[in-house]
Amino acid sequence: MKPVILGLLVVLFAAAYLAQDINEQSQGCTDEEGCVEAAQGAGEPLNRVARQTHVCVKTPKKCLKNNGVCINLVDDCAGKKNDTLCNNDHCTCCQKHVCLNTPKKCSSNNGVCINLMDDCAGKKNDTLCNNDNCTCCQKHVCLNTPKKCSEKNGTCINLMDDCAGTKNDTLCNNRHCTCCIPA
């Protein structure tokens, strides 16, 4: 019984210490980027709370013009980091690498090379592109167009594909597909 009580006391002490530390970190959070208070991670595992100390909310034009997005200094960037293009000491401009060439080993698998940080409407395969900052997005093929899409004269296509009309993500039965309704 004593080991159980001792274990509970250790957990309670650690939780109280963590709560006090989170409270101290969240006070004085006044930067123009908009801090996310560390207390937001309360109840999360310790390794997740430690990573949620700051979120870079706004990306200034000077970073956007360089194909970048502001991310936390400790986050991974599939490209080059430039600490001078964001308006916050906790952020860096991740200038995403543009994956221009899709090798045949990717395209023959219904894929296209995209930046590692981009969303893929399908499966990612990091071995089929010739650049460490790119991954082969093997796009999901939208074979079945449900009646709710076809009644609107639409066809289900992959989310990443272009549509000469309007897209409606609610009319297809697969999260990788959207209903393309011609204009």
Image (tube, rainbow, N blue to C red):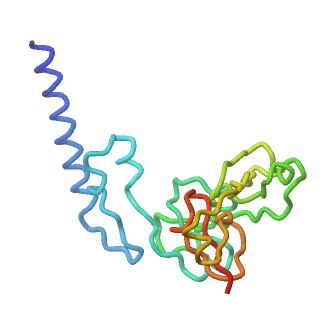
The answer to which quarter of the image holds residue 30 is bottom left
Tell me the quarter of the picture where residue 34 sits. bottom left
Q: Residue at x 35, y 48 (%)?
A: 49
Looking at this rendering, what residue extends furthest in the bottom direction?
183
Left or right of 22, for residue 63? right
Q: Nearer the viewer, residue 28 or 76?
A: 76
Residue plotted at (68% across, 58% down): 142
**Residue drawn where x is 81% and y is 48% of the image:** 109
Q: Residue furthest right?
A: 104
Picture layout, residue 127 above or below residue 5: below
Task: Tell me the quarter of the image containing the N terminus.
Answer: top left
* 90 sits left or right of 102 in the view: left
Reply above or below: 19 against 58: above
Q: Nearer the viewer, residue 75 or 1?
A: 1
- Residue 124 is situated, as x and y percent measured from the top left of the image, at 68, 48
Relative to 14, say whether 98 is above or below: below
Q: Is residue 7 above or below residue 161?
A: above
Residue 2: quadrant of the picture: top left
The quadrant of the rendering that contains the C terminus is bottom right
Q: Residue at x 64, y 60 (%)?
A: 118
Q: Position of residue 77 (x, y in %)?
A: 62, 57
